[in-house]
Amino acid sequence: MSDARTGIDFLLEPYRVLDLTDERGLLAGKILADLGADVIQIEPPGGSPARNIGPFHGDDPLPDKSLFWWAYAANKRSITLDLERKDGRALLEKLVAEADFLIESFSPGYMEGLGLDYENLARMNPKLIMVSITPFGQDGPYSHYQATDIVGMALGGFMYLTGDEDRAPIRISFPHFYLHGSAAGATAAMLAHTHRMVSGQGQYVDVSCQQAVAKTLAHAPQIWDIEGAILKRMGVYRQTSGENRVRINWPCKDGYVNYMVQGGTVAYSTRALLDWAKEDGLDTAELDEIEWEELGYGAVTPKLMDQFSGPIGEFFKGHTRAELVQGSLDRRILLFPVATPSALDDHPQLEARGYFKEIEHPELGLTVRYPGAFVKSGDGKDIAGVYRRPPLIGEHNVEIYQDELGLSSAELQSLKRAGAI
Amino acid sequence: MTSRQESNKPLHGVNVLDFCWVAVGPMTTKYLGEYGATVVRVESVKRPGTLRRGAPFKDGISGLNRSAYFASYNANKMGITVDMRHPRARDLMLRMAKWAHLVTENFTPGTMESWELGFEQLKKVNPAIVLFSTSMMGRGGPMERQPGFGPVLSSLVGLTNLTGWPDRDPVNPYGAYTDFIVPRFAVAAILAGLDRSRRTGEGIHIDMSQLETTLHFSAPVLLDYAVNGREQTRVGNRDPGAAPHGVYPCAGDDRWLALGCFTDVQWEGLQKTIAPDGNGWPYKPDFDTLLGRKANEDELDGLLSNWTSSWEVGALMETLQSSGVPAGMVNDCRDLFDDAQLQYRGHFQWLDHPEIGPYATDRSEMNFSVSPGSLDTPAPLLGEHTSYVLKDLIGLTDEEYQSLEEDGVLE
């Protein structure tokens, strides 16, 4: 494979993945590709529908300029193949014979309808691991429900707990429903692989995105189960105990900062913040009187929160985010930025660890900074990584169909002409 | 649980020495335990983990063995209690490292080294060992020791800025959200490490920065800044590709339905459900095309809210789904337990805990055709398995065990 892989001691070097997913499952294969697997993205002729998802480079809505595609198809190779044609399926079967994993995100029943269910594919390759990622799982009362991100985040229980209490529940403005299920798809693939390493046997895994989201709710389900209480959303606050809550996000001069007032073992942080506010001429006399050191977790009452919010809220508004973050580092205050994309692009820790990777897009005459590997070796060496720009539509058709599967160039041309690839 | 089922689990025979605490680590090792690994958590009586002190407690009475939060994330694990600051603790842990295939920890970088249990030292006693470390910011760099936890990381990673109403302050995604994004990447990486260790006989230290991992949940947003210079921010519940798209009130207190129409067919399904006779506001020419609906979205949302507010939310979801409209009720935590699909999948499972009694925990979101996981035992009481693990699994003699106990190595 490409030279760009050199220098990375990949964990998953020996394995091949056939990735049939669309925008609902791309991340699963991306995780395995970042770990070093050879991931072949199989697109329908004309390209994956994920290429229609914006934003686009230069706001130009072309299939090779979708930043969603860039983010989740980088490192992969692409071939085109029409599953709804016999020739397409015959090619897929050839690929399956040599593959370790197949991941798909079609609606339940679609693959089976084409004779591509696990049982049939396993006849060609009993070691194959097939992972299906769907909103609700392969069967059950909702399995044929239509699900978009907002529907899934709602049914997964996330939204009821997120947002301002006087308005409707809210989702994250960047869709996460399918990402949770897709990440679980990579986990599932590796669990099944670990089983295969010992047993020699492949298997089928059915992943539910709804369940994946419902697993992000920390102890909220247990609060219902054990206390019979339904936790509610609290906007910029966080419940600490009973009626007590602390504010998390505060407006500052040019954005927001994250600061939770606490006593006890971190009373030093609160005192340092009060001292700083005092230097600005704010009246903190009453707050200084409080025995922060004696205050346990969850002991900040609504009254104390109000009292604190006056001068401290005022103080935050008088400073920029950068001033507050730097001053807090110097004064040992537990305050953090509410980061925006530009702050992440220029982040000292990400910079020091070499997180972002410059990837060439020669067709666009561009070098693009990509988010890099999600793991490193403990000594800082690369064991995973982003090394190749996302593929053009069917970019690797010749490389894979001709050079690797042994089709002739005449056969390839017939398939192209017939629309099978 | 029969031994046959046990032996068929994917991670049967994998031994895990688990130093993880709080949420992100324990959720990671919960998957390992659910799929058959023998997971031994090392805990301290003097400094019990945060989650043991986290609500909700049985009968509202706090106690180190009464937290259902802890119990949920530590099912299928065993627990031992060791005073890691005791001079003899290190030798005991090295003995366990010989037994283990995998060591997991999520301390501030440097903690394992301070106990002289860093990767190099573990590798000396077990050359094939996989050490998994995860921290907020990763090892090395100017901010490696930055303190913090989930709600902080949501802000650092940019997700808070992407959540909320455009006319209001941003809000945190619920809870320690990033703690529940990281574990799936973590398990994939751990098993990839284990795979390589088995193939090569050589151990590996995997270091995961939770900041770096979580950024993959907003990678297109980062690219938008990198190539277009655009700072994306929160947009409420709207979506550029759909209208209507949002959350609408239903009958009752704080009941809501989420829906989104991305295609003509979905919009027509909604039109027909609202006005089967083909007349009325859904058929206004302004609402005929997506661009028309986007241009008049406030008006559309107002009319739609008016219509949804008389519906019972469950009935409305079913009605709209049967017309091909993507719609789902906003489940609160009680609804999750009643949700027909989650019930079908057996999402919640009850385990019987000696002090808490039956408590609910969530099963894996993955169903395996050949080697399913299962949750069989409740979370350990503090120190419950110290004797069993050290004598029966590690093979300490009664004399050795007694000496460790008398010396205060075991708590």
Image (tube, rainbow, N blue to C red):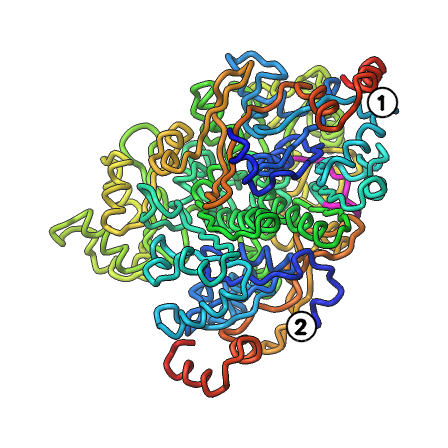
Name the image quarter holding residue A289.
top right
Q: Which region of the structure is painted magenta?
A: B138-150
Residue that lies at the very extreme toward the front in this rendered image: B4
Q: Is residue A357 magenta?
A: no
Question: Which residue is found at the position 68% from the left and 41% from the top?
Answer: A319
- Disc 1 designates what residue? B86
Instruction: Name which residue type carries label 2.
Output: Ser
Q: Chain of mark 1?
A: B
Q: Is residue A346 left or right of residue A421?
A: right
- Asked whether residue B75 appears in the rendered view, the answer is yes
Question: Which residue is found at the position 80% from the left and 30% from the top?
Answer: B93
Q: Is residue A266 left or right of residue A392?
A: right
Name the main secondary structure of what is drawn in magenta.
Answer: loop
Q: Position of residue B310 (x, y in %)?
A: 23, 35
* Disc 2: CA contacts within 10 A as few (<14), some (14-19) or many (>=20): few
Question: Which residue is found at the position 56% from the left and 11% from the top?
Answer: B61
Q: Is residue B143 magenta?
A: yes
Of B2 and B318, which appears nearest the observer?
B2
| Mark-to-mark CA distance, 1 and 2 | 51 Å
The answer to whether dots 1 and 2 both sit on one chain is no
Instruction: Name which residue type carries label 1.
Output: His
Of A378 and B233, which appears nearest the observer?
A378
Of B259 and B23, which appears nearest the observer?
B23
B235 above or below B102? below
B334 above or below B234? above
**Residue A2 image label:** 2
B351 above or below A168? above
